[in-house]
Image (cartoon, rainbow, N blue to C red):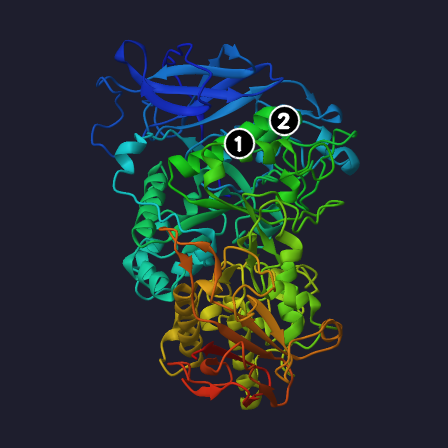
Amino acid sequence: MSRTGHHERSRTAPPEVWPGAPTPLGARYRVGPDGVAGTNFALWAGGAEAVELCLFGPEEDGDGDGNRDGNGRPGAGADGPGTEIRLPLTELTHEIWHGFVPGVRPGRRYGFRVHGRWDPWTGARWNPAKLLLDPYARAVDGEFGLPPEVYGHVRDWPQGNVADTVRDERDSAPYVPKGVVVHDEAPGDEWADDRRPKTPWADSVIYELHVKGFTQRHPGIPEELRGTYAGLAHPAAIAYLRELGVTAVELLPVHQFAHEEHLLRRGMRNYWGYNSIGYFAPHAGYAAGSTRGRQVTEFKAMVRALHAAGIEVILDVVYNHTAEAGELGPTLSLRGIDNRGYYRLPSDARRYTDYTGCGNTLHVVQPNVLRLITDSLRYWVTEMGVDGFRFDLAAALARSMHDVDMLSPFLAVIAQDPVLRRVKLIAEPWDVGNGGYQVGAFPPLWTEWNDRYRDAVRDFWRGALPDVRDLGYRLSGSSDLYAWGGRRPYASVNFITAHDGFTLRDLVSYEHKHNEANGEGNRDGTDDNRAWNCGVEGESDDARVNALRRRQLRNLLTTLLVSTGVPMLVAGDEMGRTQRGNNNAYCQDNEVSWLDWSLLADPAGPGAGLHRLTTRLLALRRAHPVLRRRAFFSGRPRDPDGLADLAWFTPCGTEMTERDWYAPATTLGLFLSGRDIPGRDERGARITDDSFLTVLHAGDRDRDFVLPGAPWARAYELVVDTAREDQTKPPGTVYEAGAAVRVPGRSVLLFRVCA
């Protein structure tokens, strides 16, 4: 990052610092004693010897009265944009340093300098030469670069094995962003017209998207709003989401994040944002307006607009590590405030315990770290309006001292919190440490990304399943993983693709990663793609190969959207977006990652056709509760006709036996009975629905499938046939029970029982 301006110490008399209060943490603008307006600052810094509040002026409040306090007097920022005022915080309460500064108004930039011992061998890394971001900053002005001055240690020390142990005395203030004082409006005033959708889990369809990637090339969004929160709030963006039929957007990280040094050296950026440094601040890079706090207002407006359309907002959050990385990383915030308090350190306290693969792990069992995380979560719910969270590497948060513990402090606090236990909680149920894979182990209240669903469905459609036992569990809600402790089928978030890995189109076009553009020698990204390229690696001009790929896309999407559980789509998969074989596009802030809306420009094109099928499948799911079950299947007869709620069939039209489950199979039928669905409606009445038969055929040749007769049905209507290129409307063909229906190679047929 280039130098943002020369910072000088103020030559004017510093403002007074009144004692203030130790709570709430962070910078809170309020009217203090005697009706004087100002800001209370509070910072937990256990073990520190002194704390200085550093103010940078002037404010930018946009209210037309310039830099004046609430009483019309000149504010504390009268020194100008290049000056720094250092104010010692002398009040200390329970390791919290605090003070109230009259005249400091919203829009004022600030940071902290924390004094203490420098002894990396014992984990002490205090360095007052480094300006530190407030962990509770509600907004951040500027962007993090990584010049040598932002490191707490001397980076070019000749003794490489102890390079991180020599303190760097250069001032980092000119090179780092600043926190911004934000005015907290009364929630009752700001959210008076907001109506949270509160979509039940069983009815949810999640759409994972990137704020910038979704809006950057959208032709209906004004150019000045593309790539921003305001762009996602634009009517054109919201109309698309509503018409598609999703109920929630899951936003890739929007907490303030920093770019890694190795990317900046190559002229690249962290696009995904899994490198957080500010857990209360909306990422300034996604703001259309000023970053002096107005990104907060813009984010709130986006949430309100999505809520008005009936769409929930779920945030992908990264509380497992921060952008400060390992011992050779920069000193931006927590490391310089209390390194030993915020991070897990091993017996060699100079190093960091790393369960995340990113250099450090937050010390969540430490009460003030746990407080930071839960305060952040509650803030995003109560003041920013969001409806839930997807926790990146959640197993790292569930570790007590070393092992993953489902009775850990983090999970216990969430379970009893009156705000957080009522929102959607999604775990990525693994980390990179020993024992970190915990799929199916999280307690009630939690749903989980189910990677076993992803793997089974990919393997079936590429012809790599040795038998269909695992597939049976995955399609019917994964009861083997989740049928305990009161959990329900919607504990499983079913997905075939996610931001991390191939797009759906690339899954059927590539078998090997092609990440050369990342500049890491194609070493990054997983090698376990479970992909099939239909015979040709990469783009092809072979009409038969491309037709097969389009069919495979329809097969995968149909399988996902008729499975029991909560489906998650990745933005662009419904139109056939490609990343050109890059399965780790975390640093591709360009056309590789941005949605290509031209795929929908031709109504007769393959992108538009895939989009129509996705929209129709989501409408079908929305209309039929049998596809959105709230309880696991019993597999036993539930009505006088002896009809089970779930049955599996061989191509001969007979129910599968134990032996069939253990044999290789490319074709099976799944019957869902809608005659008596467990649960009751809002008035206590039984829930009934149509019944459906799904036939999945992964073989390459056509074959017959005998439609089951009594007691299952007397006739079937074909509503989806993935072998058809034209998905404008259902086929509508009706077949008598017992008929042998010809199933095209590699296709899905979905039938509705009509008699």
Q: Quadrant of residue 41?
A: top left
Looking at the rendered image, the disc whose residue lies closer to the viewer, 2 or 1, is 1
- Residue 672 at what x, y percent from top left? 53, 69
In the image, 298: left or right of 659?
left
| Amino acid type at mark 2 | Gln
- Kindly report the distance in space between the C-alpha atoms of the residues bearing marks 2 and 1: 18 Å
Residue 330 vertical placement versus 116 (above, below): below
| Residue located 47% across and 30% down the image | 136
Residue 97 vertical placement versus 621 (above, below): above
Q: Nearer the viewer, residue 54 or 355?
A: 355
The extreme front residue here reads 640
- Residue 498 at what x, y percent from top left? 56, 60
Task: Give me the disc on residue 691.
Answer: none
For label 1, count other residues whose C-alpha is less than 10 Å away and answer few (under 14), some (14-19) or many (20+). Answer: few
| Amino acid type at mark 1 | Gln
Q: Quadrant of residue 72?
A: top left
SS under mark 1: helix
Earlier residue among tags 2 and 1: 2
- Residue 118 at what x, y percent from top left? 68, 22
Residue 517 vertical placement versus 304 (above, below): below
Residue on which the image places disc 1: 416
Q: Nearer the viewer, residue 316 or 658?
A: 658
Residue on which the image places disc 2: 366
| Residue located 75% across and 74% down the image | 659
SS under mark 2: loop
